[in-house]
Image (tube, rainbow, N blue to C red):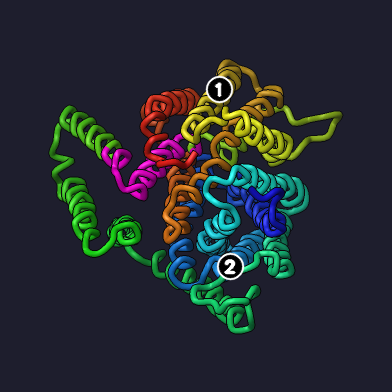
């Protein structure tokens, strides 16, 4: 085992730090900007409408990495794809800034179009950036190198250092000076990310270069940069064209396109993974099986069959589908082909990852609104910006991540390092505890309190951070260990899709549960607790399915 970490880790650390500064600075302002009154430069949206837009944005932000991972694996290589994503995201942030700076020059409808265009550009750019920078980190370590989990914890510190600076600088500028200055600061952070990576590119050695790169080439040349600029412009223009067409289509047409799009994405992802694992013509039978399942779902759901069933029949059909899905996962985990059994582990943990992030991402949604409306933020006559509460999580990570990094290595030497599945379960248990505490804070408001102590949110964020450190960096490391080397970026995109589902649920849960008169925070608590218990029960099977990977 080599000692220490390569220089590239610290190059990627700072690149990701500035990108996360950009993203979290924008996220800290998102719902506050949308719900601010028109006279104060906002859009005057209701909490529910702002949360729904937040759900769509944060969901799609983690869905497009599937596309970015595939483009990197098949065509451009990880490094060029990261540059493209960074430049495109910078433009997206500047578009958000323009929507704020032009508050008194444009109509609210035109500004919202400009704001949504910026969000669309950010979604596409993030898809190209996010999965590929993480997999470059993994390229420097062998699968069973105990430094790998430690490296991803260090990398995770970079993420959270940026997540601290973003709300502090961009959040404060947006809330206390003007919304546009906050988004502009986020865009400048994204530009700094690209500049730093370019200045330190030689430290990446030969990792992440385009396919068929000649030996000895360590940095991208002028031709590569022409490609980067052309692809960046094409993505921005393409986003504008698609959003313009979309806005003018009838709802019935957009619904059909959405169904076709998600179907194509599922089938395309299945095809790439199956072809990447299976040799010869064996892939056809498996792929056609997936096509059959998807076709059956579409026929039942949109062919009128589902609506014709009674409520009891629908309930028992869902139970049957859940049971069949569980049996399918168990069969996949018991597959003798190590690539398939490991893929079963990834799919299983990705499913439970959704539960954690549906809770965690309340930070930019309901927690942000709770901080603004129901938390005492006045200290010695000064009112703290509500967005600053989001700094608690990254500050806690900067303090705790080095400790976790050392602890995993120490436990590994003592042969006591928990398996990946147990770490996941512990992460969910901490999440359940955090939402138990948040339930008590909400209970105080429901029973007449106008404001609560800031310590409630402080403790919730710290406990959630403990769960995140048990789950998130370990998940990134897991993908680079378990995924077939030919598919690692695509599978990283699949992993990001579980974040997409969790983020989307985070924004939609409040309005969904309101229909059933079910309180949000207790619901998340019980889902996390139950998910953790199921993982513990499945852990012996999951451990065997990893085929020698810890």
Tell whether 232 sits left or right of 14: left
Task: Spot the residue most to the right.
Answer: 380
Task: Spot the residue most to the top.
Answer: 447
Per the picture, the main secondary structure of the magenta-coloured stretch is: helix
Residue at 43% from the left image edge and 69% from the top image edge: 74
Q: Is residue 341 magenta?
A: yes
The residue wearing badge 2 is 79
Using the image, determine if residue 254 lies above or below residue 438.
below
Secondary structure of the residue carrying tag 2 is: helix
Q: Which residues are magenta?
A: 331-357
Nearest the eye: 151 or 24: 151
* Residue 463: mark: none
Question: Is residue 370 visible in the rendered structure shown here?
Answer: no
In the rendered image, residue 486, in percent from the top left (x then y), is placed at 43, 61
Residue at 46% from the left image edge and 38% from the top image edge: 353
In the rendered image, residue 341, in percent from the top left (x then y), is placed at 34, 44
Using the image, determine if residue 222 lies above or below residue 477.
below
**Where, by quadrant of the figure, is residue 280 drawn?**
bottom left
In the rendered image, residue 339, in percent from the top left (x then y), is placed at 36, 50
The residue wearing badge 1 is 433
Mark 2 nearby-residue class (10 Å; few <14, some 14–19, many ≥20): many
Nearest the eye: 91 or 290: 290
Mark 1 nearby-residue class (10 Å; few <14, some 14–19, many ≥20): some
């Amino acid at each position: 085992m080599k000692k220490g970490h390569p220089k590239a880790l610290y190059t990627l650390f700072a690149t990701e730090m500035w990108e996360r500064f950009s993203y979290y600075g924008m996220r800290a302002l998102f719902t506050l900007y949308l719900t601010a009154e028109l006279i104060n430069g906002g859009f005057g949206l209701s909490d529910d409408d702002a949360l729904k837009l937040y759900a769509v944005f944060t969901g799609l932000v983690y869905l497009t990495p599937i596309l970015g991972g595939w483009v990197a694996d098949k065509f451009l290589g990880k490094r060029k794809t990261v540059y493209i994503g960074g430049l495109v995201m910078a433009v997206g942030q500047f578009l958000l800034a323009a929507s704020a700076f032009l508050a008194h020059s444009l109509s609210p409808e035109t500004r919202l179009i400009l704001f949504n265009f910026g969000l669309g550009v950010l979604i596409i750019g993030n898809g190209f950036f996010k999965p590929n920078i993480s997999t470059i980190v993994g390229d420097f370590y062998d699968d069973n190198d105990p430094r790998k989990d430690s490296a991803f914890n260090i990398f995770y510190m970079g993420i959270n250092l940026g997540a601290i600076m973003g709300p502090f600088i961009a959040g404060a500028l947006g809330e206390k000076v003007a919304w546009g200055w906050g988004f502009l600061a986020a865009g400048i952070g994204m530009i700094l990310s690209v500049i730093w990576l370019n200045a330190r590119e030689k430290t990446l050695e030969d990792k992440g270069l385009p396919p068929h790169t000649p030996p000895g080439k360590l940095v991208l040349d002028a031709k590569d940069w022409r490609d980067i600029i052309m692809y960046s412009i094409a993505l921005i223009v393409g986003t504008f064209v698609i959003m313009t067409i979309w806005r003018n289509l009838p709802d019935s047409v957009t619904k059909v396109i959405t169904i076709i799009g998600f179907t194509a994405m599922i089938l395309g992802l299945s095809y790439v993974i199956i072809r990447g694992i299976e040799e010869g013509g064996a892939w056809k039978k498996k792929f056609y099986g997936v096509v059959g399942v998807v076709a059956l779902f579409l026929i039942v759901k949109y062919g009128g069959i589902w609506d014709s069933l009674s409520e009891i029949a629908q309930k028992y059909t869902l139970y049957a589908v859940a049971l069949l899905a569980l049996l399918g996962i168990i069969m996949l985990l018991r597959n003798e082909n190590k690539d398939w059994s490991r893929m079963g582990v990834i799919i299983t943990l990705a499913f439970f990852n959704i539960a954690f992030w549906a809770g965690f991402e309340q930070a930019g949604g309901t927690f942000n609104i709770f901080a603004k409306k129901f938390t005492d933020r006045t200290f010695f006559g000064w009112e703290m910006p509500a967005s600053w509460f989001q700094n608690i999580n990254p500050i806690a990570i900067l303090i705790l991540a080095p400790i976790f990094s050392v602890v995993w290595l120490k436990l590994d030497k003592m042969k006591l390092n928990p398996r990946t599945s147990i770490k996941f379960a512990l992460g969910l248990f901490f999440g359940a505890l955090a939402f138990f505490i948040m339930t008590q804070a909400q209970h105080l408001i429901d029973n007449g309190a106008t404001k609560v102590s800031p310590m409630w949110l402080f403790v919730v964020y710290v406990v959630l951070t403990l769960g995140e450190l048990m789950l998130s960096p370990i998940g990134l490391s897991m993908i680079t260990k378990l995924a077939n080397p030919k598919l690692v970026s695509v599978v990283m995109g699949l992993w990001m899709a579980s974040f997409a589902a969790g983020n989307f649920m985070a924004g939609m849960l409040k309005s969904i549960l309101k229909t059933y008169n079910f309180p949000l925070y207790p619901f998340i608590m019980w889902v996390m607790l139950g998910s953790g218990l199921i993982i513990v029960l499945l852990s012996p099977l999951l451990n065997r399915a990893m085929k020698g990977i810890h």
